[in-house]
Amino acid sequence: MVGATGAVGTVMLSLLDERPDIWGEIRLIASARSAGRRLRVRGEDVEVLTLAPEAFDGVDIAMFDVPDEISARWAPIAAAHGAVAVDNSGAFRMDPDVPLVVPEVNADAVADRPRGIIANPNCTTLSMIVALGALHRAFGLQSLVATSYQAASGAGQAGVDTLYAQLAAVAGDRDLGRNAGDVRKAVGADGLGPFPAPLALNVVPWAGSLKDGGWSSEETKIRNESRKILGLPGLKVSATCVRVPVVTTHAVAVHAWFARPVTADAARAVLRAAPGVAVLDDPAAGEFPTPADVVGTDPTWVGRVRQSLDDPHELALFVCGDNLRKGAALNTLQIAELLVSHDQVRR
Amino acid sequence: MVGATGAVGTVMLSLLDERPDIWGEIRLIASARSAGRRLRVRGEDVEVLTLAPEAFDGVDIAMFDVPDEISARWAPIAAAHGAVAVDNSGAFRMDPDVPLVVPEVNADAVADRPRGIIANPNCTTLSMIVALGALHRAFGLQSLVATSYQAASGAGQAGVDTLYAQLAAVAGDRDLGRNAGDVRKAVGADGLGPFPAPLALNVVPWAGSLKDGGWSSEETKIRNESRKILGLPGLKVSATCVRVPVVTTHAVAVHAWFARPVTADAARAVLRAAPGVAVLDDPAAGEFPTPADVVGTDPTWVGRVRQSLDDPHELALFVCGDNLRKGAALNTLQIAELLVSHDQVRR
């Protein structure tokens, strides 16, 4: 596992404790800065190795959670050493020779990996795609509007630290949030962290980098990755990505159009039967998923399922998924488990 | 002014200080509980009167910001006394004999008021409708998906108090927000206030009451009111309303389809020329509206204007509007000013 000491790596280690132990040796790899540290894996202390070609000697599956440029360089090296690289960066997701895999949606795609690399989708795509995949199989997805409520941890540990620090800076002052810029002033210019505006007592309609046409990279990722995972190259997708003051778990308001008419009852029946999906949808009883109520769990949570009042082919839903678990570590691990269970590694 | 002591009434008083003084006597009216209090209006102390029929004697314009059932009873009484009632409750908005008015969009509608009542739209509709009205006039609106990021003050002063109290309860604990239900526990069962789930470190996909098909009243209001204000009874509208931990100013991610193709440049040009709209849209420079940066101001702020990559008729935008100002007090006052300037009151 490369990137063992990051926010996602930490979740990966706890998942390795929880899930079936189908592993032989687990090797932890990180930058030179973290090498030599000892981390607890499946009850044992394991020393973190420095990222180097020989670290991949004899490795069957190399899981990467590191920045794009590190993955771009090192995943091919791991593959050249005979490992299957399962990469959670954006470096290979749209490479036509690299499958982009969500086990509940397109498990078969793991077999076709000419470069020896399998990509893990972006956390925002992952927070909704398992539910959408199930609905697509049943009703034929044609068009999608996705607007996100994204957690601070999507911006890494720096995002989490920034949110906690900003909350501490604004809490207790009951005058804040009523005049333009007062939260920005309370947070301070050097308190913005990785965000382009204050996140405490605010929402920020920006995530990632600027792409053509004013779209953010987070928004184009949702479009491109959804198309590839679902095998729908012509799927219409418009996304608006917004950061909210939540620690972990992304939420997405999904409005989707299908080839066949779809009632809320029919959609809920499909979702209840779908692996990896949990339905929580009884607003009369106050039942719907919220990030703080489902964080730390594995499923894609779905609620607020509604058929459009104007178009029987249109469905609205509200989806929550833990961006560090299913959105990153869990899906990566599921891909690795798939490889082992299908005996697709050389071991 | 009926409801002078509430959250919106307080903003109304400060707006009366700021805007042209075209008023004669201003009478403040509230429930018996608040009667006798003295409030500052245009530099003078004015005593709050008890709501009673005779309080409307000689009144030209009666502005109401009170719960639906109070408006339902008292706005007709004010009208029977010869006043034009401008009502910010939901009691009359969909009444075919009551115009629903946004001065920048359908000012002419004030003249046709068979019941002597004019309704002010819901705050969430108002946070986006001025921008949508301008785009509709230019490009012909056909269909709309609106997903909201709604502030706590939309639930009144109790919502604001609850958010501040919850922030104080969670701030400083850097373990919260990582495990399901830990925020709920920190906030406490009696700390939820008017919200069905914790709002601090969370987002809550519910506002209002339950309507047919699982829609919330806030969501059906956006649909019904947008249709009426824009004069488009067949407009397709799907909304998902979500409460976020922001004090004041609603944000809405809008995805809209038009009869004519619409580029982002053309849309921005229309919006820049539109009264009541301010465009803030240069993501490369970190420019886009956020609630905390525009709260306390009058315009409808628009940023993140993007043409769909898949459909030249589809536009995405991110809109912010102060729900207590344009979303309530300001629009009410603008309607009253329109009546005075058009000499439509008996004075």
Image (cartoon, coloured by chain):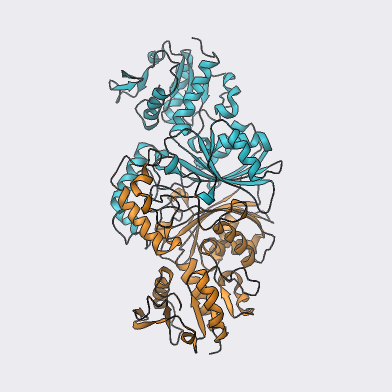
Chain colours: A orange, B cyan
Q: How many numbered discs, if any?
A: 0
Res B22 quadrant in image: top left
Going 51% across and 23% down the picture, which residue do you hit? B335
Q: In this view, does B4 lie above or below B161?
A: above
Query: Can you see residue A193?
Result: yes
Res A99 quadrant in image: bottom right
On the rendered structure, is B39 left or right of A79?
left
Q: In this view, does B289 lie above or below A221?
A: above
Q: Which residue lies furthest to the right in this view?
A: B260
| Magenta span: chief secondary structure | loop
Q: In which quarter of the image is the N terminus of chain B?
A: top left
Return the x and y of residue B325 as percentages of the image width and height.
44, 32
Query: Can you see residue B188?
Result: no
Query: Of B50 and A213, which appears nearest the observer?
Result: A213
Q: Is residue B115 above or below residue A171?
A: above
- Stretch in magenta: B239-243
Return the x and y of residue B210 as percentages of the image width and height.
49, 44
Going 62% across and 79% down the picture, which residue do you hit? A115
Q: Is residue A116 magenta?
A: no
Return the x and y of residue B333 as percentages of the image width and height.
47, 24
Query: Of A118 and B29, which appears nearest the observer?
Result: A118
Q: Is residue B240 magenta?
A: yes
Query: Of B137 and A3, which appears nearest the observer?
Result: A3
Return the x and y of residue A105 as percentages of the image width and height.
59, 69
Q: In this view, does A49 lie above or below A219?
A: below
On the rendered structure, is A295 left or right of B319?
left
